[in-house]
Image (spheres, rainbow, N blue to C red):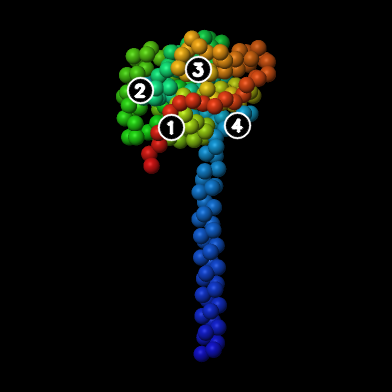
Amino acid sequence: MKNFKILMTAFIVGFGLLGFTTIKHDKNKPQKENAFAKGYEIGDEATDFKLKNIDGKMVSLSDFKTAKGFIVVFTCNHCPYAKKYEDRIIDLDKKYKSQGYPVIAINPNDPLVQPEDSYQKMIERAKQKGFSFPYLVDEGQKIFPQYGATKTPHVFLLQKEGGKNIVKYIGAIDNNYENSNDVSEYYVQDVVNALLKNEPVKMTKTVAIGCTVKVRK
């Protein structure tokens, strides 16, 4: 009987240690899965993507063979901040596409959370505003977490270097979302102009002002 009690005690202790190890492992799991949730930092290589455009075609950064870089903007239909910046995003594309830095707009929002950002509504909005750039849908919301986009709009300015897309700027378009006539700091324009002149980028990060990305819970 004594030996049996000793054996049972050893079994219970061993099982408890195994359970503790398992719980500890499970707690660490989410940290590994969310390790990239912070997104890119300046100098990181941005991986390419393949997303559906409003014309139904799939678009990748690699499709733009002659581009020197990209003005990647996470934006959407419904957000009042995004609407304030629509004309300025169009102007950026018209000004810099011919110089090698086209705008690539991506809608990161889940349409079940915000119906105004559905694919059909994207088509309608792009036609209404006369978008001159791709307006892509992040189906499955796989791309915006890689970049670390948290707002609409949120800009990631990339430059091609040795076949890689290197992050050169992250943040806002300028310093006045309310009124384009009262802007005193043109963040994105200044960065692109510096890159075109092979000059150092003075302002590499700013705080993006806008609506939060809409994710299904």
Q: Kindly report the distance in space between the C-alpha atoms of the residues bearing marks 1 and 4.
A: 19 Å
In which quadrant is the C terminus drawn?
top left
- Reading the image, the residue beneath label 4 is 41
Determine the residue positioned at 35% across, 22% down. 122
Please report whichever mark, 3 or 2, sits nearer to the chain's N-terminal start: 2
Q: Quadrant of residue 109?
A: top left
Tell me the number on the disc at residue 213. Answer: 1
Q: What residue type is labelled 3?
A: Asn
Q: Which amino acid does label 2 sit on?
A: Met
- Reading the image, the residue beneath label 2 is 122
Q: Is the residue under label 2 in contact with that under label 1 (CB below 8 Å)?
A: no
Q: Is residue 24 left or right of residue 203?
A: left
Determine the residue positioned at 62% across, 21% down. 203
- Reading the image, the residue beneath label 3 is 176
Q: In this view, does 30 lie above or below 46?
A: below
Q: What residue type is labelled 4?
A: Glu
Q: Which of 96 and 155 is in front in this view?
A: 155
Q: Element at badge 4?
A: loop
Q: Kindly report the distance in space between the C-alpha atoms of the residues bearing marks 3 and 2.
A: 25 Å
Please state the horizontal and vertical placement of residue 215, each as a whole percent of the image: 40, 36
Q: How crowded is mark 2: few (under 14 residues within 10 Å), some or many (20 or more)?
A: many
Of the residues tagged 1 and 3, which is closer to the observer?
A: 3
Please state the horizontal and vertical placement of residue 75, each as a whole percent of the image: 44, 24
Please report whichever mark, 3 or 4, sits nearer to the chain's N-terminal start: 4
Q: In which quarter of the image is residue 13?
A: bottom right
Q: Residues within 10 Å of mark 1 (few under 14, many from 20)?
A: many
